[in-house]
Amino acid sequence: MFGSRTAWVFGLLVLAGLGSGCGEREKEVHRPLVSPDGGSVVEVVEIDGKQAVIRDGEQVGEKHDKVLSRVWSPDGRSLAVIAKDGGKYSVVRDGVAVGKPVTNVTAPIFSPDSKSLAFVASSAGGVGVIRDGEPVGGWFPHVGPPAFSPDGESLVFAAQVGKKMFVAQDGKPTGTGYDRILYPGFTPDGQSIVCVGVTNDVSFVVKDGRKVSGGYERVWGWAVSADGQSLAFLARRDGQDVLVKDRTEVGEPFAADEVAGPVFAPDGRSVGFAAGRGTWFLRKDETQLGGAFQAGGVRQVLFSPDGKSLACSVIQRRRAFVVKDGERVSEIYRAVSDLKNSADGRNLVFRGVRGKKTENVSVSW
């Protein structure tokens, strides 16, 4: 048995009333995307040459030439998409365009409180970060994807000034310039900014403008514990990948083309991640949990409340499922929602999309 399930119909493909003629034909363009709270599902379908965003069976806004990306707000109430019409791109939130059409945009992000929306836009004036329709700090030759502070008040992104990239907080470049800056973001308390700075193809983890690691061939990503006392990242040295926690390499090196994580356990002591090259594994500190599994990609990694187990959501071609400690613990779905812990901490819970139905799924930790 793969957990308990409760099913109900959302009517994902019930498109009555979406068009003006009875000759319309619908074709799925993107796989379903479940909201973080599991309460809604969005699809993109093609109707007589145009693409429509369908939320819980109802069309949202106008049809577009193409719909390229979909992002849910953290509270699951708002949906943003990238739409292409007439050679121009727009970010559309709940059916309403945010700002003017531009020559290119990146996937938007919502603030943690779901109120604000930010994205990178390109126009004749340069490249800039747009927040709620307005540029943040003007236009630059190049900028990177933005990240919100935990309280949603501040934004940080990489911005080019001259020939170097700088960390820009709310549009103001500060600190040391690097050839590239990757993954800028805030610590959980919002008091510090961490990023990866790259100079002469050597990557460093940088906190508040100071290097806090040695040099690596590549740094995949970083995480800070909830209490702010510990920093971990995944990096490559001498052609091998390693987990680094507080400047110390943990466990044996491994080989991967992709990683998901790292993430800290709730108590801040252990670090978990998923990594692979077609064949993936889950690892907690120096220990691999369970066996290897096949995956096209891993979307999320989650610790159990006691920090003993790891789960992840897996994408394999047009299928999605959940793996816990190296073993598949769910049925095969078209899509799954974000993984969460149940209120009592005993179960891993999520929702899966199968056909026209979504199912509540609960799996014991």
Image (cartoon, rainbow, N blue to C red):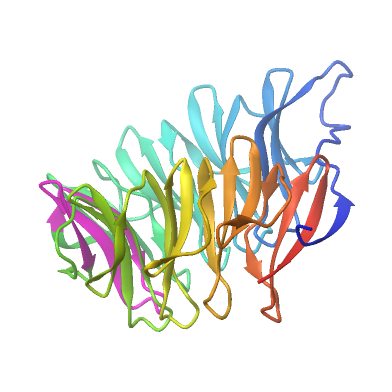
Q: Residue furthest left?
A: 200
Q: How many marks?
A: 0
Relative image position of residue 355 (x, y in whole percent): 81, 39
Relative image position of residue 142 (x, y in whole percent): 26, 42
Q: Residue furthest top?
A: 23
User: At x 40% / y 41%, what residue is drawn?
Assistant: 121
User: At x 18% / y 68%, what residue is drawn?
Assistant: 209
User: Does the segment drawn in magenta span residue 335?
Assistant: no
The image shows residue 178, relative to residue 318, as above or below, that is below
Closer to the camera in the image, 154 or 109: 109
Stretch of the chain drawn in magenta: 177-206
Prevailing SS of the magenta stretch: strand
Query: In the rendered image, is residue 5 in sight?
Result: yes
User: At x 28% / y 59%, what residue is drawn?
Assistant: 242
Relative image position of residue 145 (x, y in whole percent): 37, 50
The image shows residue 339, relative to residue 238, as above or below, that is below
